[in-house]
Image: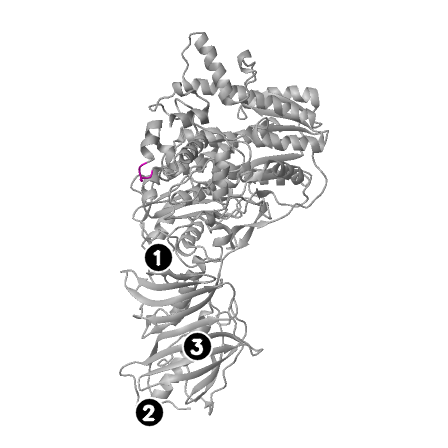
Amino acid sequence: MLEVVAEKTGYPVDMLELSMDLAGDLGVDSIKRVEILAAMRDQAPDLPEVDPAELGKLRTLQEIVDRMALDEKAPLDEKAPREAAQGGSATQSRRADRPPAVAPGVPPTASSAQPLPQSMRWALRLEATPASGFALPGLLDATAIAVLDGGSGLAELVAAGLAKHGVKAAASTPGATSDGVISLGGLADLGSVDDALAVQREAFVAAKAVAAKLTEGRGIFVTVQDTGGDFGLSGEEPSERAWLGGLPGLVKTAAQEWPAVGTRAIDLDRDGRDPKTIADVIVAELLRGGTPHRDGAAGAGIEVAIRADGTRSTLISYAADVTPGTQRVTKESVIVASGGARGVTATTLIALAEASGARFVLLGRTALEDEPASCKSATDDAGIKKALLADAKAAGIAIKPADLGAHAARILAGREVNATLRAIEAAGGQARYVAASVTDGDALGDALSEVRAAWGPITGIVHGAGLIADRYITDKSLEDWGRVFDTKVEGLRALLEVTAGDPLEVLIAFSSVAGRCGNRGQCDYAMANETLNKVLAVESRRRGNTFFARSLRWGPWDGGMMTPDLKKHFQDLGVPLIPLAAGAQMLVDELTDDSDSLELVLGGEPRPEALSAPDADRSVPATFDVIIDREAFPTIDDHRVKGQPVLPVALVLELFARAVEATRPDLVFSAIEELKVLRGVALEHFSEGGDRFRVRITRVSNGDGATFRLELLDADGRPRYSANGIAERSTPTRTSVPPRPGALTRFEGTVYDGGALFHGDAFQVIVGAPDIGETGLEAVLEGTASRGWPAGEWATDPALVDGGLQLALLWTCNAEGAGGALPTSVKSYRRFVRGLIDGPLKAILTVTDQNADRSISDVVLIDSSGQPVAELLGIETHVLPGSRTSSSVRA
């Protein structure tokens, strides 16, 4: 161990002791920990696997040695902040059951080399996404949800709305016993930017209060904000509200750190509506929009935007190439670049200097100082440390390893700054360096006054400064959070303030993919970068069409703090890195773009669901909770037996289909098979609070498609329905139409007589009287759209499905002379088109089996062009006991 640490840190072996603190004594950060671990395994391949994130909790070298033989987990914990490599963290912050999250959105695969992805530029848009009908996971099981008012005046109303449906929520401040948080501070009226930033701080404090409990179990974590109902993409909200924009970064990080917890970031446009209306919208989203429906592949459904007109959308990333135009930075430009003197930011500025000949003011924290003469011949960290240690020994000074490392780091940083200045000059630009904190407005103001006197007004900003201090929410202190958050957010604020009088033409923020997807251990960094994105949107709109703003959410770079060991680690996991030259050219190209894309991910595709562990046990059941009540499913009022609302089989089939789509959004729901009514469901609380159910779904096969076992459980956990669900790569097809049954005559009875067909208006989908005979019938049906069911994206056409079942009931009762029958199973349901079907459809029912009390039939639905659109095969119906009459209602 000591030899490896000496090699990787440059400290002489004789300075090292196993009792030394990695951060405090040696200045070892998480990147170096990964290097040390990799080097130890290279020397001793038989050592057990130890997740790199687990090293974060280990303080001393001895603890690492001891840990190498253990199999227990510990959460990530970084002691000291460090400058961020642009993109996500340059660390691998992960637990043993989760893949590294430095570059969220890249599916982990084993490979020895990682080619550059075909697309490296991803824009952002809102896409309308109807609610799934399911509750937010964890909501109905939570025992103590704290609704944090945050000055919104809504907490009591939201808590009461949830309590009406049996949800255990109360207006309160989150504590250690809370297993849920709904933070409403983002809806409060704001008087200043400081007010907005205080809301973000309060949300982090709330997350930390429940972190220990939510790390270990289920619950919910929700934030609600008003940044225009579009997550600030339009930039139309008042400028101070843009500074709320980091709240989704906290939620998306929480979703990764607490995988069993239901998470949601809601942007709700208040639009002057009264508090009760706003509270009702929030409650409805939590009760019926909780599980992603058809948008999991695009953004995991965590972020939901709700406009004042009720339009519900989620954020979608899509590949978008640069639209080439004119270079906006020229030799006349004066660009202030924070964090621009070192690392990958410096690399991009050198390329920009070559392309434009511009003048650059580089801001950094490194104070330039003359290095000792003994170090001038040393070319690396180890050589500098050796020289400094020799100087200290010669002077009789005892020096601690951490102090030695800090001095060496300052020397290397100074060299890098000077090298950047020379490179910019060599590339055809001009450069000067200012040693100042980007958050120190006074120091920046003084420095830029000198720049203006020499070069003229500032015309552009590149904000690249950033820190990371990786710790899980449960371990991160408010001080940790503030250092990371403020460097990005207060830094941008200071830059905008000191250039308020300048004719700015360009504003570039070096953001991170961590903001788009969240990143374990980096809630502060994700929140900060999300805030930058939204502030730039407001600045862009405020300053007009001639102003150019871009928030560049970089993925990880193949440079900067990317060490060979860490690079190999990325490659083994299939994480694409941005080559330095390619990334530098991306900035140059971006400054010619004529599109209106402001928030961009540069690097691998941002797909949060790709963070799922590759070896996760997919056979573990997933659950989807739903409350059936009049408010959510008003048409059930027309599905009553003897006055009692009864859950329709067609609606169960719809819920099963939605669960399949939510579980495999990359596939297309195609069929429900072996649907069985285990026990019918009377809805006892339909009019007051609703009845709770849970869809349990378990994968039973996989391959090109997927098959799932489905169950509908009641509030007591008893199964009421079961089925198999099928998802495929494409919608199935059927071209054959069954023959018309022979010897049909017109049905002469009353179709909806209150007996065999008890259905009310919303379910009366049989048009006119069918033609009926001994082997089947032919009828015309209307669908969900025609009967005025609630608008939304249905996975099936439930009114048509129910109509098919009604035909089977009608035929059975007619054939058996019975006053009532019920469907008890369906062999299979398949649809051959997506969405609801317009216009009346022809339905052909063919009887395949019959005895005294039971019949089995197939129903095929055919559109006006003669094409089958859906089929219900093997519908089994049974005559209700005691319902036979003396004679059947014959055609």
580 or 507, which is in the foreground? 580
Q: Which residue is mark 3?
A: 804
Extent of the magenta region: 69-73
Q: Please tell me how many numbered marks the rendered image carries.
A: 3
Q: Which residue is mark 2?
A: 887
In this picture, is 629 found above or below 417?
A: below
In this picture, is 407 found above or below 101?
A: above
The residue that appears at 36% across and 46% down in the rendered structure is: 156
Q: Is residue 49 magenta?
A: no
Counting residues from the start of the chain, the first of labels 3 and 1 encountered is 1
Q: Which residue is mark 1?
A: 621
Residue 231 falls left or right of residue 329: left
Mark linked to residue 691:
none
Residue 650 falls left or right of residue 345: left
Q: Is label 3 in contact with label 2 (beta carbons under 8 Å)?
A: no
Counting residues from the start of the chain, the first of labels 3 and 2 encountered is 3
Image coordinates of residue 792 in percent, x first then y, are 49, 62
Alpha carbons under labels 3 and 1: distance apart: 31 Å
149 or 597, which is in the foreground? 597
Q: Which marked residue is nearer to the observer: mark 3 or mark 2?
A: 3
Q: Is residue 71 magenta?
A: yes
Farthest residue toward the top? Answer: 395
Q: Amino acid at mark 2?
A: Ser
Crowd class of label 1 (few under 14; some 14 to 19; many from 20; radius 10 Å):
some
Residue 463 visible in image:
no
SS under mark 3? helix
